[in-house]
Amino acid sequence: MTPILEADHVTKSYPIADRQIAVLDDVTFAIAPGEFAVIMGSSGSGKSTLLSILSGLDRPTHGRVRIDGIDITDWSEDQLAPVRNQTFGFVFQSFHLVPSLNALENVAFPAELKGDRQARQRARSLIERVGLGERATNFPHQLSGGEKQRVAICRALVNTPKIVFADEPTGNLDSQNGAGILELLVELHRERQTTLVLVTHSPDVAGRAGRIITLADGKVLTDKAQAGEG
């Protein structure tokens, strides 16, 4: 089976004064379709930088990134933009909802960008699936943190992406809301068989995954499969 996502000797460095500082150092792994993988590490370990590179938001200094066996490392922004909109879904710690759009419009937006005539219908179905049917016309400032993150998850899924990238999706939530969001992500991952790649520093979050890739000082420290997803 062709991996859906590959990091092949990925290195990322930045010039500081007269030196090159490596944030990622020769990171290599492959993720199978439908897998739930956590990238874990302490602050400064390089995990968010790695997620940005895997999702085409940033480029490695050296190494390659492949999606479904296709090398996207050197693709232009025009080539990457539709991939990020249609093949990937994104869930961020800070929600990143459009303030001037209501919940339904925020969810529908990526589907409308690609000209999907069923965008609103898809969005409403997802909004109702996560229990926000009565909040569909509310704007972000009228929603709680947990509700905003549920809207963000719906937006990530509206185009039926192959891969969902989640960067500390429970980081701005209290423990109760964080647990609910994690449960929702796991449920939707199972239902849709979407590959889920989640960055976290939380052992509790990592414990739900089928695989944990641990970074330390920009290198892969461990890469372990586990029962997870329970």
Image (cartoon, rainbow, N blue to C red):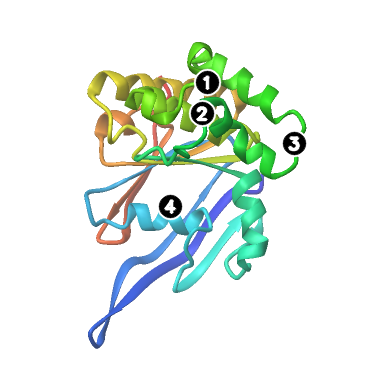
Between 3 and 86, which is closer to the camera in this rendering? 86
From the image, tell me which residue sits under label 1. 137
Which residue is rendered at x = 54% and y = 33% of the image?
Answer: 106
Q: How far apart in space, not on screen, are marks 3 and 2 (Cα)?
A: 19 Å
Residue 87 position within the rendered picture, expressed as x and y whole percent measured from the top left: 64, 45
Please tell me whether mark 2 or mark 4 is closer to you in this view: 2
- Amino acid marked by disc 3: Asp
Amino acid beneath label 4: Leu
Residue 178 is situated, as x and y percent measured from the top left of the image, at 31, 25
- Give the residue number, with chain letter if any, for mark 4: 51
Q: Is residue 199 left or right of residue 163?
A: left
Give percent across and percent down for residue 101: 52, 34
Work out how far the residue at label 4 is from the one at label 1, CA to CA, in angstroms: 32 Å
In this rendering, which labeled residue sits more in front, label 1 or label 3? 1
Q: Residue at x 27, y 34 (%)?
A: 172
Instruction: Name the N-terminal-most of marks 4 and 1.
Output: 4
The residue pinned by badge 2 equals 102
